[in-house]
Image (tube, rainbow, N blue to C red):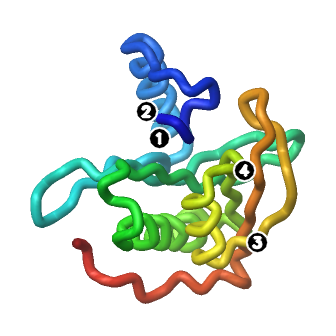
Amino acid sequence: MRTLATDRHVASEEQITELCERHLQHWERHGFGMWQIFENATGAYIGQCGIRKYLLHTESVIEIFFALRSPYHRRGFGTEMARAVIQIGFRDVGAESLVGFTLPENVGSRRLMEKLGMHYEGVVEHAGLPHVLYRIARHSASVGGHRGSK
């Protein structure tokens, strides 16, 4: 939650319910959204990943979103799930580009976006705080050949 909640506080049950409802409404409207990710071998909850429509200033964009529980950091799960979601964004949704943003100090997410071939574009305001913005264009995406599920 330290890097997901911009105010550093854990959401209340009411706020989590509201967020889940917004995610479900996004699926109904657009046919894509967030997935909850579980490890095949153990069934353990790993995190979430997905794509969503987002209004970035005046530009309507498709945002890639990913969050992993800390025990799963630096084990390839983030790369695998994000590559799969990027493929869905380009192949199934038809996006011309995908964006991602994070707090500047979230080095892990920044490294993952760079590993995915996303390029730094600058700083944007999100949730009242500066975030670094990355983008990958369809024509430059090299996301094929992800390995099998863990």
Quarter that holds the C terminus: bottom left
Q: Which residue is mark 4?
A: 104
Q: Which residue is mark 1?
A: 27
- 136 relative position to 81: left or right: right
How far apart are labels 3 and 2 at the CA level? 30 Å
Q: Please, what is the three-letter code of the amino acid marked with disc 4?
A: Pro
Q: Please, what is the three-letter code of the amino acid marked with disc 3?
A: His
Q: Residue at x 13, y 54 (%)?
A: 43
Name which quarter of the figure residue 128 lies in. Answer: top right
Name which quarter of the figure residue 78 lies in. Answer: bottom left
Q: Which residue is mark 2?
A: 24
Q: Secondary structure at mark 4?
A: loop
Q: Please, what is the three-letter code of the amino acid marked with disc 2?
A: Leu
N-term-proximal mark, 4 vs 1: 1
How far apart are labels 2 and 4 at the CA level? 29 Å
Q: Which residue is mark 3?
A: 119
Q: Circles 3 and 2: CB distance less than 8 Å? A: no
How far apart are labels 4 and 3 at the CA level? 14 Å
Q: Nearer the viewer, residue 92 or 125?
A: 125
Task: State the mark number for residue 50.
Answer: none
How far apart are labels 4 and 1 at the CA level? 29 Å
Q: Circles 1 and 2: CB distance less than 8 Å? A: yes
